[in-house]
Image: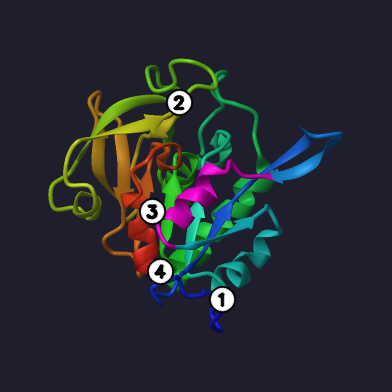
Amino acid sequence: MDAAGAEEDGQGARRPLIGVSTYLEAGARWGVWELDAALLPAGYPRLVQRAGGLAVMLPPDAPEHAAAAVARLDGLVVAGGPDVDPARYGAPRDPRTGPPAPERDAWELALIEAALASGTPLLGICRGMQLLNVALGGTLVQHLDGHAEVVGVFGRHPVTPVAGSGYAALVPEEASVPSFHHQAVERLGTGLVATAYAVDGTVEAVESPSAKGWVLGVQWHPEMGEDVRVMRGLVEAAR
């Protein structure tokens, strides 16, 4: 393993260290235990590994530690999860918005800000894309029908890339993606551009051409599918 913390794969290529943010859940249950736990669906580290990276979990911590954490990484994934507190983007709470997760909001916003400041490659997934938008001054639609058909079940729908975008360079064709969300980007944050759309016009990917480093957000859940191209884009940028 080198000084940056990334070992080589079987072909001698460097495997970047990719941090993935996590849930912090009270009373999680496994085996004989019921304890508070930092949780991450296994699809996230598996996708990082399949794309050629080393995955590490980043449970919520004090926001002032975010820059130090990001400095040790080659790339950052802000994972899916609960609704962003609408107070973060100056909106009243819709009754259909889920309960707030203040520790996670604060930690992940600090991680995003540190990654943007340092130029560390950044991928936001679902909530992670929404939080990236909020971090840059954007707003969210608090309830959207048709993108979470059955509670606890991922659906699929087509996403069309914007020609000439960074996302289109990774996935040039219309793709069917795994999806589960009821919120979405409304007003884009400063520097962000929409680079993929659903059939109903929902923004499905954003990127920041003016950022210091590679920045992409996707509204769907690539960790629940077989397509590694989006994660491979992050891993390659992190090498």
Pointer 4 or 3: first along the chain? 3
Q: Residue at x 50, y 49 (%)?
A: 46
What type is the residue that disc 4 sits on?
Ala
**Residue 53 or residue 76, whichever sits in front:** 53
User: To which residue does mark 3 refer?
Assistant: 231
Q: Is residue 42 magenta?
A: yes
Point out which mark residue 238 bears: 4
Lateral position of residue 228 relative to residue 70, left or right = left
What range of the chain is rendered magenta?
Answer: 39-52
Q: CA distance from mark 2 to mark 3?
A: 19 Å
Residue 185 visible in rendering: yes
**Residue 93 or residue 238, whichever sits in front:** 238
Counting from the top left corner in percent of width and height, residue 81 is at 56, 37
What type is the residue that disc 3 sits on?
Met
User: To which residue does mark 1 refer?
Assistant: 5
Q: CA distance from mark 4 to mark 3?
A: 11 Å
Pointer 2 or 3: first along the chain? 2
Q: CA distance from mark 1 to mark 3?
A: 19 Å
Pointer 2 and pointer 4: residues touching (CB < 8 Å)? no
